[in-house]
Image (cartoon, rainbow, N blue to C red):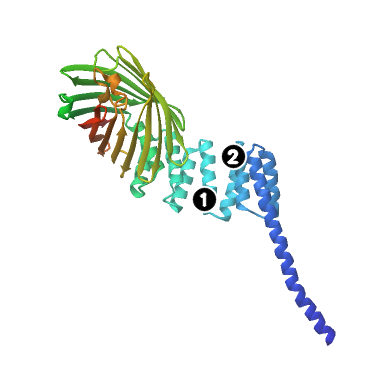
Amino acid sequence: MIRLRTDIKHKTSVKPFLALVILVLNGLFLNVSAQSYDEARNLAFNGDRAKARQLCRAILAKGFDSDVALLLGRTYAWDGKYDSTRIVLNEVLSRNPNNMDALDAFVDVEYWSENYDKAIEYCDLALKKAPYSEDFLLKKARILHSNDKYKEAVATLEDFIQKYPGQAEVLKKLQEYRPDVMKNKLKISYTLDIFDKDFNRDPWQLTAFSYGRKTKLGSVIARVNMAQRFGDTGFQYELDAYPKISENNYLYLNYGFSRSSVFPENRFGVELYHNFPKSFEGSIGMRQLYFSSSNVSIFTATLGKYVSNYWISLRSYVTPGSDGTSVSGQLQARRYFSDPENYIGLRLGYGVSPDDNQNLVDVNAKSRLTLKTRSIRMEYNHIISRIWILNGGATWGNEELIPGTYSGYYSFDISIARLF
């Protein structure tokens, strides 16, 4: 009887011990698996995908792990082995139909295989499960655009931004894709500058006519500017181009010439724009202005960011000269509404911008670039029926006439554009 009790007590004490051993071994296995997964991931991202696959298969032989399986499938896809990828991804989805990472991988595989319709199916499936997903929405729009379905791509973005406003990347992509549907743009604008009596100037007027077209290489814009100053009327002819270099890079190119004294004789501009992660955009470039008696070089750079429904950017201009270096800048903010063409804007400026032609329509335009000028501008932009764009703005500023003495000026501008 005593022996029986001893055996029972011994067996009872063994159970917690075995549970503890199993728990420790299981923890060790999980830790080893995690370390092995990290090692496989590092191998894959460092280009040694064959070894990464061997390690993934070894881990999966001990037990299924969706993260490991997805990494295995991704390595097949990166090597163009799409059928093998599909086998792995189907296994993941059969175990968990709501695995969004597997759906994301399937979208990429079908897109890379140029099976656009199938890729769209997976996008739609993911959007049914997560209708607010910006990532799947952007992938769907990009796939439609790649398949030359421009109207569908734009409609997809427009519908999404109506339901879920404040998506910065969607706004940017809509701005990029919309010209593929409406490739042509006619625009007319008018600016009136009124000065305080200290200037002893009549009002200045600037009228501009432009035509732009989206091409496969990028947008091209031809423009004619007509300025009326000091009883004289002058014309300037300009050409802008925005060639796209890659997915995240494009150029701004500008050339203009005039035979009138109220414009630079020639002007050149070049600027490289780059889209950074997290909705940042930056640029660096220069402007070259040629007047009858001298030339001016201006260096410029910008940094901007989309924050929800807002776009905030800072631009600087640096103008070296014999009398020293002049620095000017602009801080700009826009608040977007239901469309990238519907917004209100505010701009604070110090110094003169060479990109504003109303600042360079003076017989002393070269000297104006170094003036101490402060300004504030408000604008409103609105699109009507998706084909008409209206813009209106008002600017108040003051300009240093002599050291320490400022006088004010007011600018009012309006423009209308037609997309077709």
Residue placed at 49% from the left, 42% from the top?
119
In this view, the residue in front, 305 or 166, is 305
In this view, the residue in front, 379 or 197, is 197
Separation of marks 1 and 2 at Cα, in angstroms: 17 Å
Q: Do the residues labelled 1 and 2 touch (CB within 8 Å)?
A: no
Q: Quick one: label 1 or label 2, which is nearer the N terminus?
A: 2
Q: Where is residue 165 in the image (x, y as percent from the top left)?
A: 35, 47
Residue placed at 78% from the left, 76% from the top?
11
SS label for mark 2 = helix
Residue type at numbered disc 1:
Met
Q: Position of residue 86 (x, y in %)?
A: 58, 44
Q: Position of residue 124 (x, y in %)?
A: 44, 47
Q: In this view, does 237 lie above or below 147?
A: above
Residue type at numbered disc 2:
Ala
Q: In this view, does 242 lie above or below 39?
A: above
In this view, the residue in front, 15 or 88, is 15
Q: Quadrant of residue 21?
A: bottom right
Local crowd size for mark 1, using a 10 Å CA cut-off: few (<14), some (14–19), many (≥20): some
Q: Quadrant of residue 182?
A: top left
Disc 2 designates what residue? Answer: 77
Residue placed at 58% from the left, 55% from the top?
95
Apparent side of residue 356 relative to residue 86 in the rendered image (left or right): left
Q: Quadrant of the C terminus?
A: top left
SS label for mark 1 = helix
Q: Where is residue 226 in the image (x, y as percent from the top left)?
A: 22, 20
Disc 1 designates what residue? Answer: 100
Residue placed at 20% from the left, 28% from the top?
190
Q: In this view, does 84 lie above or below 95?
A: above
Q: Quadrant of residue 156?
A: top left
In this view, the residue in front, 183 or 331, is 331
Numbered label attached to residue 342: none
